[in-house]
Amino acid sequence: MKKEYALITGASSGIGLEISKVLAQKGFSLVLVARGEDKLKEVSQDLIQNYKTPVTYFVSDLEDPAAPKAIFEFCKNKGYFISLLVNNAGYALPDAFHKTPMEAEEKFLRVLGISVVALTKLFLPDMIAAKQGKIMMISSVAAFAPPSTIQTLYGPIKTFINRFSEGLNLSYNALGIKSTAVCPGYTVTNFHTASGVQQEMDRVPSFMKKEAHRVAEEAVEATLKGKKVSVPTKTFKIIVFLLKVLPHSLFPLFSKRLAPGRYEKK
């Protein structure tokens, strides 16, 4: 009998790390995936010590087209059944679209989009065979917002992730598989510093900056309940509601205060 595990990409920091902690606290066995082995080893040891749950890790860079297959083969060879797949890995591009090399855009699309499709496609057949499985897609409030002059591709990719999750639910809910698109707003992690966009985060009002652990708790709760979409925190639930009901032409007016720089010309 295969051992059930939750697999988390981008697990060594930020929201991915906090999701790993929440799942470990709930007794899940974990497979952690990230690029840096030293950090992965440290995180794994901390989780084992603090939560007394099985934790293993696999070093992988999702910019590599071969990475999803390598992750899948690792789990297959270990005899792991991935009953919960958390597609979390991501980053932002610091420069304007016209200044960003195409190679960088392709890597960005691979990590945030293509690898998500590939990992889901690889692990889905085992979920179908077991008649159970959950998939968590870390999307963003940006999926609901109008296009902006910063992070030109980020919002569209997250919109795709939401629609992809919807499609999975339509196709596989009847087979016992549920996908949850988790759409956080501004979250306090090393994401912005590591991506070179910390100055954008610094300009956001403090009431809009949410703690990563709180986001992770709501994300895990929604996924385990089988919710199709989760927008963590009341603040961003209200913002998403406004984004849905207000004309997009009005959004830049109040966005100047809530998301400074979003509509400034580059």
Image (cartoon, grey):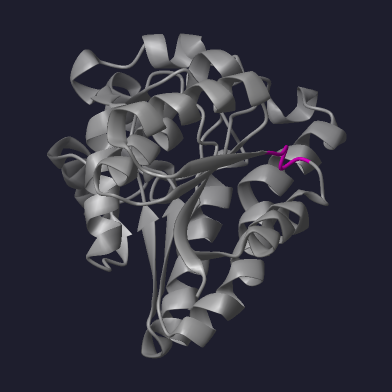
For the question of whether residue 6 can be seen, the reply is yes
Q: Residue at x 47, y 83 (%)?
A: 130
Q: Residue furthest left?
A: 234
Q: Residue at x 64, y 70 (%)?
A: 121
Q: Residue at x 44, y 36 (%)?
A: 16
Residue 53 spot, x, y in % from top left: 36, 43
Side (left or right) of 234 relative to 180: left
Q: Is residue 157 above or below residue 121?
A: above
Q: Residue at x 42, y 88 (%)?
A: 175
Is the stretch drawn in magenta largely helix, strand or loop? loop
Q: Is residue 128 magenta?
A: no
Q: Which residues are magenta?
A: 59-63
Residue 83 spot, x, y in % from top left: 44, 66
Q: Is residue 233 above or below residue 255?
A: below
Residue 125, by quadrant, is bottom right
Of the pair 51 and 223, the residue shown nearer to us: 51
Of the pair 43 and 140, the residue shown nearer to us: 43
Side (left or right) of 214 relative to 17: left
Which quarter of the rendered picture does the C terminus lie within? Answer: top right
Of the pair 96 and 59, the residue shown nearer to us: 59
Residue 81 spot, x, y in % from top left: 52, 67
For the question of whether residue 243 can be seen, the reply is no
Side (left or right) of 260 relative to 213: right
Query: How many numbered marks appear?
Result: 0
